[in-house]
Structure formats: structure tokens, C-alpha cells
Image (cartoon, grey):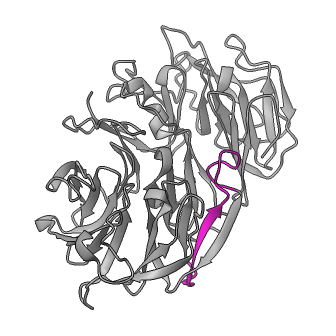
Amino acid sequence: MDIWYEVLPGPAGDAYFVQLDVGRDGGVYAVDNQGGLHFRVGITATESTDPESMPEKVGTDWVVVNTNENAVNVAHCANGYVYFVDQTGSNQLTHNVDVDDSNGFMGSGWTTMATPGTPRTVTCGADGKMLFLSTTGEVYYRNGVSYSNPTGSDFVQVNIPRSATNMVIDLSVGESGDAWILFADGFVQYIDQTNDNVDLSGDLGSGYALVDVGASQLVQLDAGNTEVWGVNRWNEIFVKRNVDHVENPLGDDWSQHQGEMIYVSTAEQGIVWAIDDDHDVWVLRAGTITSGEIINNEPTWTKIPDVKLVYVDVGKEGQLVGLANTGCPFWKKGITDQNPEGVNEWWDLTNDQSNQDTYYKFGTIAMCMTGNMHATLKEGDSALYFRAGVSKEYPYGVEWVRSSVDAGETLKQVSCGYRGYVWAVTTSGNVLKLEGVTADQPQGTSWSNDERSSISHISIGDAGEIWANDYNGNVFYVGDNNNQGWQ
């Protein structure tokens, strides 16, 4: 199987991602330049290496999960806990609580943890073991962390040799508990937390080693369970493979990876997320999201859009639609089971085949599992636009039609998933469901009000589950389309 990268849309509006981290079951959290903390929904664990399973590894949408918009750095632990550093400069970390199957990825809320110094970055790995780097270059380890006590007991300072001119600039804990420390001169130090000879509160013992990264001069790194990835000052990407804390704790020699990125994050085998210098988000779609053999084929890059997209949606048989920043809709050509990334060409759906003088500019677009498409007008409208004439011959349809079913208020965003069910959010934050939608009647018959208010975005999964977030950053979940209640 070939290995390829895919670029994904970032946060809405003028925000862009500046840091991200991959954790339990391939889950991804990201921080934007305005302090927003986002989670990538739709990622599910799979051992399949078939290209058809790859959309499960990249997710479907970003949702905002913190309420204060003050995050600057985030860590997603192997036990599901999330820590982030805020913008206040306080001696504290914020983390979620009560992470379990009933509370979902966010847990039941957020709380703060006092720290002995002001955190700059935070990282965590095996069993939730957590370290943070202070603004003055000290490294602290959270003592007593376990699955039964995920927040631990106290902090101890790690005794790492350094100087005023060669401070620690980054650190990362892998899923095996090993820690990788990056210095300003580009050198990496390795701490094996699984080694009984290691005393993190004093001398580092035999679990300590100095790794020379040579001319690569890393400025950021991230450790997974079998690989360590990093980028240097020239945005070049380097990787250490086959890291095994027992047999080969330092892994193979550093090797340069194709492409240029400013930030990388990896967790489980072969799953790598990255940000480029244009702040586009990329994902390396290879390997598995559960333990197993790593696929080490020669990596290749696949160029996705020739246009700058700000909104994409995936639907039936992996078909992809997107919107440019102008609101113009595009369809990705050539997507098949054998070629899931398609060909390097887009079909412009801005106007109709029957009326080349009519141009449409949309604010959001949704691709249904039935093959239908729905969109909201960028300038605002109380009705959806749907793509008529969708068929095997013309899977992208032939023309846009304004639905005759009026919602009674301006529609802001639309999402479509399970059995073609269509939901929308209005500019006033109300949630509406389009009733009577079928493959032959994509415009539906009427709108029903879910009586949920202040919602800013909604996403419908393939199994009928509904995720939504409000303007305060709260996230809501409905288990299926039977309206079993918002959680």
C-alpha cells in the first residue's frame, strides 16, 4: 500500500492551527492562533490498511471544546486525558476530568492543576504519564499517575543538565513512557521512564542517553509508540523508526521524510498529523490506529487541491466536495476504491450545465451518504440549495436548485449523514431537521425545530449520531436520529 498525505481544512473564520497532538485511539486535539482548542471528530480505531478504511483515520470535522479560548499548547494522553497550557501565564495546567465511555472524549468538564512553575508546553504518553516544560526551561514530571489515579499526586523537577544558552525548547513522551527532550542546539536527550534505574527526581541513572541529531537541527519533535518525528528550522521533516524501549530504545538513525512542515505530531503506528507554513493541516494516512505491524513502504506525497479550500465534506463512496474561500463549490474527480484520493483535478460546480451565466457562492456544503448534496448560500437564505440530476453518469449532478421548502429563518450551516438525513443551524443558533428527505426527493418536505438554541455548528455521523457545539464552546451529542436527548 502506498503512503500518502491529505490536507484537511482548519478552523472556521480567520483562525488557523498552530499546534496539535495525537493521543488515544488516534484522537487529535489542536490549538488555533486565537486560543481555541479543537477536537477532530469521526476518527475511529481500525487495524485495516485498506484505503477504503482511511477516512476513519482522518475524521470528519473539527469542534471547539474549550470555553475560554485561551489555550496555547495541548497534550492528548494515552489514557484519554487532555492537558492544555493557557495564555494567562499562571502556574497551572487545565485538564479534563471523568474521561470514560459515558462522558466521551471531553469528559465531564475542565479543572485546573497548580504547577511549581509557569508551563510553556505539556506532553503525556503511556498511562497518562505527564511532563511539562516551564517558561524558564525547567522540566517537571507528574508523580503518581496511573489509570486509577489519572491526575497523580505532585510534581517533581527532572534533573536535566543544561545551560543558560542551551535551554530545553521542546519535550515529548511516547506511548511506551519514554521521554524525548529537545535542546536549543538541536540535540535530543532520551529518558526511559520504564527503566527501574531511572530516578526522575534526581540522577537519571542508566535510562539516560544523548542522541546526536546531526545537521538536522530540530526545533520541534513528537514521540509515538514506535516512532519519533521532528522538524528543523528549515521545515524539513525527520523521523526515527523502530523505537522499542526494550530492544532498541533509541530507534534507527534519523532519516529525512519528504515534505516541509512547521509542526508534527504522532501517536499510534504510522499515524502522523502536521501543520505547514501556510497553516494547512495534513495527515499521513498509513499504518494502523491499533497495535500491530507497521507498514514501512516508501512514502509519497499526494497533492490534493489546486484551489485553496476552506470547507470540505466527504460522502457516499468517499466522494469529496469543497468550497473555496470565495464560496465557489468544487467536486474532486476520479475517486474510486482503488484511487481514494482521486486525480489531481477538480470539477467546478459554480454554475450549471444548463445555465452557464448563473453563479453560486455557498457558505457551507454537505455531501450525503445517498449521493445528494446540500448547501447554504454564503450571503444568506432561508432555503437550502440541492444538487439536482445526481446519477451514476453524473455523480456531481447537473444543476443547483433552490429548495421550495422554506425554513422561516436564515440558514447558516448544513450537515448530512445517515440515510441522507439533513440538519441545519440557523444564524440565530436554532437547530432544524429537514423531514421527508429521500434519494428521489432531496429537497425534503418540511422543517422541524429541535428546540435547541445557541448552536454554532452541527455534524451528522454515518451512524446517525449528532455532534454540535454552541457559541460558548460547549459540545453536545445525540446518540442517533431518534432524538434520545442532548448530552
In the image, 393 versus 358, the foreground residue is: 393
Figure quadrant of residue 362: top right
Determine if the magenta segment contains residue 155.
Answer: no
| Image height of 208 relative to 456, above or below | below
- Magenta stretch: residue 94 in it? yes
Q: Percent x, y for residue 92?
A: 57, 79
- Which residue shows up at 26% across the image and 86% down it? 162
Q: Is residue 342 left or right of residue 249?
A: right
Residue 250 locus on image (x, y percent): 21, 59
- Is 56 left or right of 192, judged from the image as shown? right
Q: Quadrant of residue 53?
A: top left
Q: Residue at x 52, y 71 (%)?
A: 144
395 above or below 432?
Answer: above
**Relative image position of residue 5 (x, y in whole percent):** 33, 40
Tell which residue pokes out farthest to the left in this image: 215
Q: Name the quadrant containing residue 327.
A: top right
Magenta residues?
87-107
Which is nearer the eye, 174 or 280?
174
Query: In this rendering, is residue 210 above or below 308?
Result: below
> Is residue 425 among what the camera can see?
yes
Residue 399: percent from left, percent from top? 58, 19
